[in-house]
Image (tube, grey):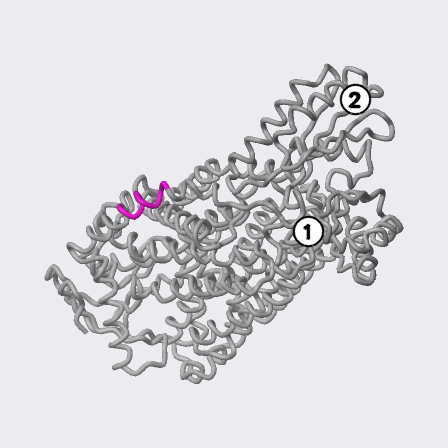
Amino acid sequence: MRQSGGSARSEGSPATDETPAECGERLKRGERLAGCMTGRWARWGVVLLWLALALVATPLAARLDDAQTNDAAAFLPPNAESTKVLVAQRSLPGGDAIPAVVVFARAGGPLTAQDQTAVQTAAARLAPFGTTQLPPPVPSPDGRAALLIVPMEQLADANRFADQIDEMRSTVRGLAPPGLTTSVTGPAGVIVDTYTLFSDVEGTLLFVTAGVVAAILLIVYRGPFLWLVPLLAVGAADQTASAATYLLARHGGLTVNGQSAGILRVLVFGAGTDYALLLIARYREELSRYAAPADAMRVAVRRAGPAILASAGTVVISLLCLLLAELNSDRGLGPVGAIGIATAFVTIMTLLPAAMVICGRRLFWPFVPKFAAVPTEVVGGVPVAVAVAGTDTVDMAMTGTWARIGAAIARRPRLVWLVTAAVLAGLAVGIVTLDTGLRQQDAFRKSTDSIVGQRIVEKHFPPGASEPTYVVGAASVDDQLASVINATPGVAASTESSSDGEVTQFLVVLTDSPNSAASFATIERLRDRVHAVPGAHALVGGNTAVNLDVRDASVRDRQLIIPLVLAVVLVILAMLLRSVVAPPLLIATVVLSFLAALGVAALAFTHVFGFPGSDPSLELFGFIFLVALGVDYNIFLMTRVREEAARTDARTGVRRGLAVTGGVITSAGVVLAATFSVLFIFPLVQLAEIGFLVAFGVLLDTLVVRSILVPALALDIGAAMWWPSRLGRRPPTTTTSALPPITTSDNRTPRPTHHG
């Protein structure tokens, strides 16, 4: 088969069951694709195209904050009762307003006359912020505090809405006499504080993530220049993915919140760097076999490309399964993450090869790979000689740290995988301590004005006063509804707040803290009772009801999406590996790794970090990322194992595959874990928890599952791992077939070559 650029090389595809003709056609397609990025003029065109795309994307990416929706009500499915309440409220005067709760409190005693004057003045000053006339301030039973509720229009412009809350806070603080504490809380205050926290760390997230990736690349490559190229490529992918997400959020109806926007950046940097590490490792390996960098890159792309494509495709399809979720936040994360992974893949497979070829071998200085006179393999990032039939060359791919690990596992593989699986199962026991009852007011890792205000309210008023519940029903039975509401256990007080003659709205204050298990139970009781009122057609909503519906929808999403993702990944692995034995075993190892990571995380959240609970979406998001990304590393390992096994035998293939991929896959796992740990810079419990769970899970999967458990299983099962393909029926052999020599594109002397 003739290579573009002038080099010729006879290559088969022992990793598949293809005929020589089918193999040749596939490799020709791979060469044509690689040639589009590495041709003499094409490489410059690719780089210039990406440069132009980055210039257009960067201003749009900077506006992603403006397209975020951090209101829990926006995440609700259309059939949720809270959603129906929001629709019904639109017909009421001021019914679609979001309440800002202004609280005044004096710690040393009752409110003074001067304090009360300040409260009345504040009510007058804040009246323009309300969509309707403000109700009078409400004094606390102990006389030490007062509440003022301002029904506000929630503006589409998040910055303008935040400015209004900031102005209100500045106004009440300026009016407060010495010793009078003020705060603006309630749903409006919480939304603004959440938005502000995300906005404040967005720029920091970019620089910290890029810094972490740069540091790891410097350590991996030990050179002053090489790390810059993959980092710049991943940076271009980040800006492009953020710009595409912004456009879809602004014009395509995509729901994006601060959580999904933060995860997008982490996914692009983590996955993109992983793909770059794998491609560069294979390119470096081929540079020792080809004199021309363009030839080496063409081989690297067509050899590493299918595994990277399968990896990216698995993650993209797994994330797109979230489109079937009920919650908009879950459904929105699917395409957001898929955009990030797909953009990272396209960038690394186009921009990176072109830029690497332009820079040439000198980019690897001071460890420049040499054009060798004998075939080589890369072990630990260093090209070394390997055996060729008819020569005395030592197979150096069977030496080194990862080769020794493989040899140790091969001595007693069954014992190794049984013990490893038992340890992982033991770690999974910690799941019983996982508490998914994280309250909204406990979701911040730093103090905010809205949280301070909620605590003041809970100290002087019924706790539910800071986030009132709403009941809407037919006006014709409003007296009966009022009676049922007030008789419901857990209700502190209620009042009719609005009516249009057909529909009446009641404002209800609960006795328990908002979003607590007790308040959720009250909402459920209240719904049961008002639903039973004949002709009322009553509905219960409000912020606590919203969060209850979000929790219930999260459970339904988890029960639907997790089995679906498992089925999708199983099918992809079966198609990629052409086996019915290997895929379920690989899936089982990744699921076991996820359960172990979740068990350790549950213990760490309680006993190390002191988190007050976990977000209901943690298990689903953690599963999606750990299973999809964990399968990545199994794909990278097992595709190389299959390639090596086809040239030797099943057991030797496992050991060689582990030896030649151990270093680069471990580096990739460390990069991904480090990028997810960057989520700890967000002062929100749910993102810190996702960051820890995924970072720890990736390391566990990389260092234990992929390095020990999977090789031990493959060694124990042997060739049957690849049944029913022909590879699963091959008799054992220990020789490596030699391949015909090649002619390099610069007409250097032909040399023996090793199939890589």
Residue 56 magenta-drawn? yes
Q: Where residue 459 appears, x then y in whole percent? A: 81, 32
Which disc number belongs to residue 546? 1
- Label 1: how many Cα within 10 Å (few below 14, some 14–19, many 20+): many
- Label 2: how many Cα within 10 Å (few below 14, some 14–19, many 20+): some
Q: Where residue 191 appears, x then y in whole percent? A: 61, 40
Q: Where residue 84 appears, x then y in whole percent? A: 66, 56
Q: Main secondary structure of the magenta part?
A: helix
User: Magenta residues?
Assistant: 52-59
**Residue at left 79%, top 55%?**
476
Q: Amino acid at mark 2?
A: Arg
Quadrant, the N terminus: bottom left
Count up the numbered dots: 2
Q: Amino acid at mark 1?
A: Val
Does 675 sit above or below residue 316?
Answer: above
Q: Is residue 445 visible?
A: no
Which disc number belongs to residue 338? none
Is residue 117 rendered to the left or right of residue 245? right
Q: Secondary structure at mark 2?
A: strand
Residue in the foreground of this view, choosing between 473 and 30: 473
Which disc number belongs to residue 106? 2
Q: Is residue 188 visible?
A: yes
Residue in the foreground of this view, choosing between 491 and 694: 491
Q: Where residue 100 appears, x then y in whole percent? A: 67, 35
Is residue 234 rendered to the left or right of residue 432? left
For residue 684, what is the image quadrant? top right
Residue in the foreground of this view, choosing between 121 and 343: 121
Residue at the extreme left of the image, as rendered: 747
